[in-house]
Image: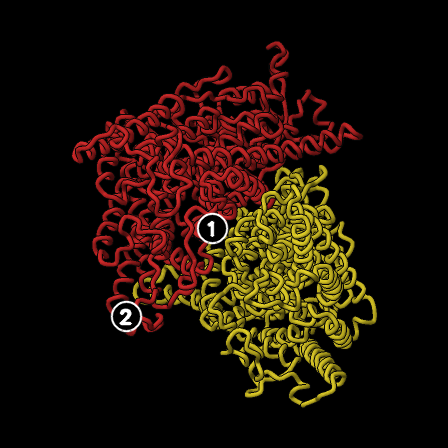
Chain colours: A yellow, B red
Amino acid sequence: MRGSRPRVKPLDGHGHAHNPSDYDAEQEGLLANGYSTGPIPSPFPQKGKGPAYEEGGVIDWQREEAAERERKRILASHRGFRGLTARLADTGSMWLVIILTGLGIGTAGAWLDVLVRWLGDLRDGRCAYGFFYNQVMCCSGLDPGELCYEWQTWSEYLNIRWILVQSLLQSSVYILLAVVFAGSAAALVKFYAPYAFHTGIPEIKAILSGYVLDSFLSPWTLLIKALGLALAVASGLSLGKEGPLVHVSCCLALLLSKMFKQIHRNEARKRKMLGAAAVAGVSVAFGSPLGGVLFGLEELDTFTGGTDVMWRGFVTSVIAAMALQYIDPFGTSKLVLFQVQITDETTVWRAFELIPWLFLSVLGGFLGSLLIKLNARIAVYRRNSMLNDWPTIEVVSVSAITAAVCYLVVFLRVQSSELVANLFMECDPIRGDWHGLCNATAIWANVFLLILTAGTKLVFTAWTFGMMIPAGIFLPTIAIGACLGRAVGLITQGLHRAYPHAWIFWSCPPEPNARCISPGFYAVIGASAMLGGVTRMTVSLVVILFELTGALSHVLPIMISVMVSKWVGDYFGKEGIYSIWIAMRAYPWLPPSEFRDKGETAADVMKPAADLVVIAEDTEGGCELEDVDRVVRMYRFHGFPVVCGETLVGYATRENLRAALDPLVLEDVASRRGRKCTFVPRPVELESESELVDLSDVLEDAVLQMRPEMPLELIVSTFQKLNLRHILFSREGILCGMVTKTDVVRLFTAKFPYTSALSSKSL
Amino acid sequence: MRGSRPRVKPLDGHGHAHNPSDYDAEQEGLLANGYSTGPIPSPFPQKGKGPAYEEGGVIDWQREEAAERERKRILASHRGFRGLTARLADTGSMWLVIILTGLGIGTAGAWLDVLVRWLGDLRDGRCAYGFFYNQVMCCSGLDPGELCYEWQTWSEYLNIRWILVQSLLQSSVYILLAVVFAGSAAALVKFYAPYAFHTGIPEIKAILSGYVLDSFLSPWTLLIKALGLALAVASGLSLGKEGPLVHVSCCLALLLSKMFKQIHRNEARKRKMLGAAAVAGVSVAFGSPLGGVLFGLEELDTFTGGTDVMWRGFVTSVIAAMALQYIDPFGTSKLVLFQVQITDETTVWRAFELIPWLFLSVLGGFLGSLLIKLNARIAVYRRNSMLNDWPTIEVVSVSAITAAVCYLVVFLRVQSSELVANLFMECDPIRGDWHGLCNATAIWANVFLLILTAGTKLVFTAWTFGMMIPAGIFLPTIAIGACLGRAVGLITQGLHRAYPHAWIFWSCPPEPNARCISPGFYAVIGASAMLGGVTRMTVSLVVILFELTGALSHVLPIMISVMVSKWVGDYFGKEGIYSIWIAMRAYPWLPPSEFRDKGETAADVMKPAADLVVIAEDTEGGCELEDVDRVVRMYRFHGFPVVCGETLVGYATRENLRAALDPLVLEDVASRRGRKCTFVPRPVELESESELVDLSDVLEDAVLQMRPEMPLELIVSTFQKLNLRHILFSREGILCGMVTKTDVVRLFTAKFPYTSALSSKSL
């Protein structure tokens, strides 16, 4: 046995009967991750149930897929009726989970909307004829223009006359309920399911790429995240429901897949299923079935799982959208959330409009980066300050401040989704003027209000995203962008009205008072630019945005704004907000982006052979069975390279070694002493001299070997594309070293200042 | 030197000064491909210009990317102002090519539309005040309902009174011009650019994945394909312009990239550029910038090139669409080609409509498969019959028959794009009745006509797609689907009118004569189903279709129909029409679809070490320089594995070996005789005894080694994901064999009956 220097301090509290505390987590990429308040997960959640990956480890895709292949082969070998039904049941179980997940998340999304709307309206008042009606349902059935007397504000309900008391009462109820909602969400999260905090997308990205974090998707998390999300959104905090819905969808899929052990037990298959579920989550969150599929493709990188994953995601997404449309929570029988009215005047856009739009795109890219940086700093500050110990207090205070500030500004007081819907809408005399937004004489007041709203939301969002509460970043980002966009649109419109004959407006219709600029669409552009800056998504963002708004004729400006804002944002830092959070939490996730080396080769990053724990046998006589057993018991690595002399023979996982050794070492000490084993099948004459136990079946089939001269860039792209766990390096057959996924992830995150800032302290 | 058994007969006519005719094309995947009439390409198109790949070979992505990396590194090492400008020029050149390609293809696409429209209208008549106006431009400026006297049919122009002579003249001109257009297109293709025939998408898929076929993208091909395409479309043959436009776009990008040697000389970089150009081609063809990007992702598989390829495609696509919109060939200032009118009545669809839509989807999947099968059979028949020698005659006869038949049926007589636009349109009293399609009393006549049109088009398309003429499959497929869809829509509408109170129609508005069914949208569903069946695309198809029609509120039914039609189609055969053509032409292209082995391992497909031509040196003394030189001269393989004793040392390309050997072997015979070389750097004391030339630098850095026990499925997916050329297999350091891309491609195509049916005969 050669070199064995443990280099990482052991994870505390994870002892296991088989191994003493002396082991090394780094050889195979077991990273020390954790949450400040999360329960310490059991290291062997699947004990005795097949491949047991430890929480916080990385799955071995090659191995999982081999297992799946083996299962399929056995299934295909069954003959006759029994075989047929077994195969049908196998395929059927997968599709059943997909269909149920789609239906489930569609339903959950719809009811969540209903709940949020009711809770949100409760902060304002109540319905006279039924406590459980929200304002829209309470006032339905009225003609346009008719006043709604059924909906009573609290002061009307309590019959208060004095205006001062009215406002005091209304604002107190507004703030009080915000605090109660947010506080109970935080308490639920803290005490029942700490993993239910935040958006969940960084974790899902890591899990889909192979990270093991089963407790993140537990039934408790499902329940708390859904409930907490409704409370959090209703509390008026600056957060959205989109990301958390993806998390809820994944929890649901995992819960459903537990019905079928063939899905649940195979980690690769489970992840492919989760990918489809995540897609459905986006589909429901935005009412955008196609955008969901593309989100899965671009952001969750589910495409590496093969075309069938995309296809399943497509189906799940369709089913979820159908369920949502069937339940129809908004009573509009439309999926589209924020409909932009495309009238004949607005379908045409003019070349000069590119100037304000480009300005918006640059602004969006810059503010997006700013939001990311601010959010990361606040998150690190939170972790290192006393706030870390009082998460519920933080949530309560922030929600109180948010509610107090928001009550003062009319655009902030309403729910974000209502604000965005109105900002996207063009002014229309029939529909009425939403809070004076269409008042042509109050342009500057409106612009000031909109910029104030955007600025306030930016700060609140940077703080809120990361508190101990379910929170998505999409909707607040859209709201910030929409405010800025509408402001720029109003200014442009004002300029046009003031100087209708200026040369720049020559392409506008010549009639006085003709409509030329559509400020509502400027809000859409602003939202796309801001989203581009924060998430750095491209294609999926465009699809989501124009499924969201129906602005098909304007797909080109949306594309341009996303493009420019991504360029500007990339100038300030390549990573989107989810990647930043992944890096801060140090999940073993490989960004799909290209890596450029500076001439380094594998030799520069690999752990050299001398530092590896290997199982070594003599070229002549094999190796002692007891030595192998000792190595396997002593180290908790995922596996060990096997060498014969110095020649690399292969790689054996600890689990397979234990399975092979356990029956052998059960024999009495005397008989096993001096017994030898080999991993290299030898000719008979050699074996006859002493009884060698042949362990060559234990070696993994799917092991990649490369030359240490391999350029680092190619190593990285091999890891990215094949989803590998490790690569062995050899020169003329002799083992030189090993590179694991962790080493490769470190290459990406090393230069980022906040890497691991949120991960190291807790465990 | 070990085992050397040439197994494939040499390619004739490709001799080269360096190598005698005794070589073997199969070791590294040089496939015998070709066209029946194509000029025999020079085997060394880039002689002396760096990496020379032979036409018909496969590029080595790893090597090309290493070269690019090296170039970038050198560029980055330049200091000061000169370095900065060099780097800026490098990035700038790439973006310049992208921008120019986008602008170019946008312009080309627009002018092609204008040309086609004019040529097509010329078959009917001429404009009184200007020969070069088409009918729409000639009659523009009229009020709705006003008759257009400026456009004269030929009989009006020649002032013919007798109706019989009129019809005779009109039909003769119609047929004659069809024959003239189609015949000249075929002649152009045959004599100037044989590669300009067909759609081009199969070849582009192969080229993007690494196939070398430079003459396919020559400037001549560009010119002939564009011109021939206009003639072919105008001739009224059953073909579309979509696929060929992608080809034109790629030709253009290659032509432009020739300005910059750093793009043109690197095969990997060139291909990434071509990927972006292809995306722009789709973007222009459909007026669907987003659909273009997704087409690139899903069908052309450009995503394997990394996220930056998608991003560049996105940008190119936007620029191309902007150019198209700026030129505005249709005078509508809209990108959308076939606008579906979304009125308040049509935004809502009812659950019972799923029944006819599902029927259409199943029909589309079935007919799509039928079309593929029919087309493949006709292509094979054409190749093996005398038609192979008379391609122009075939085109002329088919166009005459097509024109004669089409003149008789009113829906067939107009251009496909006009037919589709009208089928997608809802009936509207203001717009008038297009050829009686909206006549409620003639439902059955219309249904009969539509089914007749669909059937005729199906047969004609199956024959036309593959003739010696530029031809796309998209538009005819859409037309067939739209006819069937409209027919089903008319039937459903008829049923509703006849039985408005039947229980199935309970969700329709209760008023008599209320509109409930929109037959125009049924046509969209039919088109999606048919396209799904023929191309087997999913997400990109949905995006293209709803960018094409603007039917955003109906994205869900479109998704469902694509989904079902793909399922049905896959039942009859997994491959789409492009894959079938790739297989028939035996291009070395790996489908991205999943491969399932039946328990085979690499050992079952690899070429065993004994059959490989290897460069072998002794463990002690290296090998004779002359022996290495002889091997390199004798075999035209891309490279050779190098072994020391039996241990695998690495892989050396023939090109690098020649570069290293040529200076050495130029010395006089006496001094080089007995001189030895080695690929293994040895300790000094060994080298002193005789002067060993160290060739270890010649070895490729990026070589993958695996165990022969590796499951075949994993081998295939490694090839797919890493775009590899070969993998070496070793056991305990000893070379066991090699698998090349060709071997892997053969695994996919082996079971398909027409594999290589169009490739083996010509060369």
Compare residues B744 and B734 and report the one nearer the observer.
Answer: B744
Separation of residues labelled 2 and 1 (CA atoms):
33 Å
Q: Categorize mark 1 by other alpha carbons within 10 Å: few (<14), some (14-19), many (20+).
A: many
Q: Quadrant of residue B397?
A: top left
The x and y percentages for residue B476 are 34, 43
At label 1, which amino acid type do we have?
A: Glu
Above or below, A200 against A364 in this view is below
The residue wearing badge 1 is B547
User: Which residue appears at 65% of the width and 29% of the height?
Assistant: B696
Q: Residue at x 75, y 32 (%)?
A: B84
Q: Mark 2 belongs to which amino acid?
A: Pro
Q: Is residue A639 visible?
A: no
Q: Position of residue B349 (x, y in %)?
A: 39, 65
Q: Quadrant of the C terminus of chain B?
A: top left
Q: Is residue B479 above or below residue B652?
A: below
Q: Are marks 2 and 1 on the same chain?
A: yes
Residue displayed at 25% across by 36% down: B402
**Side of A449 where B360 appears, left or right:** left
Dividing the picture into quadrants, the one containing residue B416 is: top left
Q: Nearer the viewer, mark 2 or mark 1?
A: 2
SS for tag 2? loop
